Image (tube, rainbow, N blue to C red):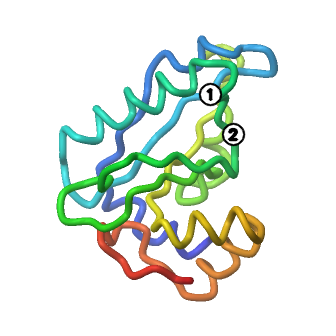
Amino acid sequence: MARSAERAGEAWVYVTTGCSLVHTSGGGVEFFVMSPFADEKHSETLAMVGHYHSFQAHKLDVGSVVNLGRPWMRGSSMEHLLVSLPYPYGPDLEWASQDAGRARFLWLLPIHRSEAVFIKRRTLEEFESLMDARGVNVLDFNRESIV
């Protein structure tokens, strides 16, 4: 998903702090979401995702999909988040240094319900290939579904 990196510098970025202290075997995880606008709802979303992730039965990893039950931000029709590698910022962001606790940073990418179904029925790799092929602007808060 290299094309998504073109707009990364334009984003408001919200990041969890403290999630990496949960499920520390193999390294803890912190999550981030990118937004074209500042919106306090993103802090609420991250708190919800962090809480959900804190339960062993709901440990989130790359390819997990979270149903928010509401639009990820006002004016959007996307109600799901895909847990993904931090493509917009490259592989250097994925792992914090050992001195910083070796947390893994994963991106919460807003997606449509139809895209969540596609990932479940097909594969994450196929979805990511479609995103690349279509040159999707990941900061378009109400983009059209690609499936």
Residue linked to disc 1:
29
Position of 83 relative to 57 (above/below)? below
123 left or right, relative to 9: right
Q: Quadrant of residue 95?
A: top right
Q: Do the residues under discs 2 and 1 have CB atoms within 8 angstroms?
A: yes
Residue under the point 59% across and 77% down: 131
Q: Residue furthest right?
A: 26
**The disc labelled 2 sits on which kind of residue?**
Asp
Amino acid of disc 1? Val
Say which of 98 and 27 sits in front.
27
Q: Quadrant of the N terminus?
A: bottom right
Crowd tier of the residue under label 2, counting other residues whose Cα lies within 10 Å: few below 14, some 14–19, many 20 or above:
some
Question: Measuring 55% from the left and 88% from the top, which residue is drawn there?
Answer: 134
Residue 59 screen position, x and y as percent: 67, 29
Rounded to the nearest angstrom, the CA distance separating label 2 from label 1 is 9 Å
Residue 110 x/y as whole percent: 44, 59
Q: Along the polypeptide, which appears first: circle 2 or circle 1?
A: 1
Q: Quadrant of residue 28?
A: top right
Specify whether 125 is left or right of 133: right
- Relative to 70, is 1 on the left or the right? right
Q: Which residue is mark 2?
A: 61
Which quadrant of the structure image shows residue 24? top right
* Observer-nearest of 29 and 74: 74
- Residue name at image x 40 percent, y 46 percent: 68
Q: Residues within 10 Å of mark 1 (few under 14, many from 20)?
A: many
Give the number of the disc on residue 98: none
Q: Nearer the viewer, mark 2 or mark 1?
A: 2
